[in-house]
Amino acid sequence: MKRLKHIKSVYFVGVGGIGMSALARFCVHKRMQVYGYDKTTSNLTQQLSNEGIVISFEDDVSSLPPQFQSYSDENLVVFTPAIPKDNLIFNNLLALGYDPIKRSAFLGLISQTHYTLAVAGTHGKTTTSTLLAHIVYEAGFEMLGILGGISTNYKSNYIIQAEGLKVNGKPVLVTEADEFDRSFLQLSPHVAVITSTDADHLDIYGKPEDLQKSFQDFADLVSDTLILAEGVQINHGAPIYYGAKAKNAYSNLRNKEGNQYFDLLLENQSVENIKAGLPGKHNVENALAAIITAKQLKIPTEDILRSVSNFKGVKRRFEKAFESQNKVIIDDYAHHPEELNAIISAVRALYPNRKMHMVFQPHLYSRTRDFMDEFALALGQVDHLMINPIYPARELPIEGVTSTALLSKIDLDQKSVLSREEAIDELAATRPELLVIAGAGDIDRIVQPIVKSYQNEESTA
């Protein structure tokens, strides 16, 4: 962190990303001058602008602020790996003599001066870390939450409490530990959770075994306590396991009046009738992971469970975008077959008598290729399916890998490939009683137009 002590200005290349924007907010709170570039505007970039961050949307070196037109060791450049290699601003900063650091390295510097609680895993890390940050905040710790999603409770991906309890003389950092690009290996975790190690990001790792090794390397960084979902294979002393059959276990999942409840066994302590903030077995598992992690800070169980019950979730994680007496729209970030299985199962449990319509946007050509059959099985569980074209993100097309190819593998009568605009038109016209919108690209842009059509129907009914 010594490197940051003398920094006065920071430039974020790709500032609108969910992880980058949280770090930009951290710099604002540290009274640095904060600037950035992103290729598109969004609600998040508008919020950052309102908070005093100067953002350019033109990849033009003339848009750089004056202090970054030349080199200064009081300046720092942070970038996301998603930035294209031919980005003019980034390459100009390199030519000026700057040594940009990745977002993960910047987060790693912050973790060195905090008591770090890190949540890793190919599924569930955003919800788990956001709930954990909420518990730690409500328990009165001096803390930072640097998250991979927008907390509904705090309306931000950055949570700060400037004064409060410390751990070993340090404030607490709660953060997501992202396996993409091996980012989590930059952290210095004291307590860590690994929720799952299912194969993903094979465009980066190549083989599932290499991804598994990366999780093992992350576990080797943990200095105090490692918490593992049952079934996760990691070598690390005596980890704490959680799950349906572990010593720390949940049981008796049930839905009542639109809410989910469960019972809990924490080692030898039994607690019944806990209200889950979010539905679905996967979210009970996420809650259990957060509860066990919070217990490492010696937070009383009753305080932890109170925070669990008033947790409102994360934007685009089982987010009810619209709900009336007869109709509901659920927006979810699910972009992996196991995540789709989880959201579909949770929705079926809550609404067993409704036909489920889903509009899904595949994310990455490589992920669609690697899990084509698994995606087909998962998506075949809904009643009516619309698939958008694949969101490429950082990738170029792969021959033969298309949404049409995926659709052909799905055993379903009511299925189609539609553009975003076509999906909006069809859903606005039909307004199904149960609609799930899923994907990690820009599919969230269809949510508000569809919600508006549902609201118009309600107002004219």
Image (cartoon, rainbow, N blue to C red):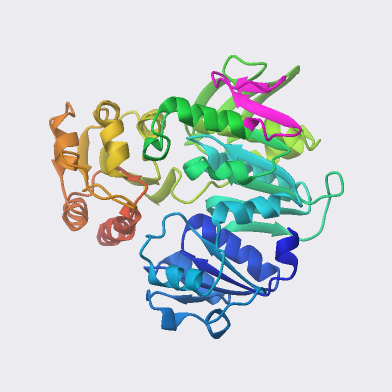
Quick one: 304 or 439, which is closer to the camera? Answer: 439
240 drawn magenta: yes
Q: Looking at the image, is 126 positioned above or below residue 193?
A: below
Q: Looking at the image, is 256 positioned above or below residue 326?
A: above
The image shows residue 94 at horizontal and vertical percentages of 49, 68
The residue at 32%/59% (across/down) is 445
Provide the major secondary structure of the magenta segment: loop
Q: Looking at the image, is 302 positioned above or below residue 163?
A: above
The image shows residue 196 at horizontal and vertical percentages of 51, 29
Is residue 401 left or right of 85 when viewed as pictured? left
Quick one: 285 or 148, which is closer to the camera? Answer: 148
119 drawn magenta: no
Q: For residue 51, say whether it is visible.
A: yes
The residue at 58%/42% (across/down) is 184
Quick one: which residue is furthest to the right in this view? 169
The residue at 68%/68% (across/down) is 29
Q: Quadrant of the C terminus?
A: bottom left
Q: How many marks?
A: 0
The image shows residue 108 at horizontal and vertical percentages of 65, 50
Q: Quadrant of the N terminus?
A: bottom right
Res. 398 image quadrant: top left
Is residue 47 left or right of 204 when viewed as pictured? right
Is residue 70 left or right of 89 when viewed as pictured? right
Q: Which residues are magenta?
A: 219-242
The image shows residue 78 at horizontal and vertical percentages of 55, 63
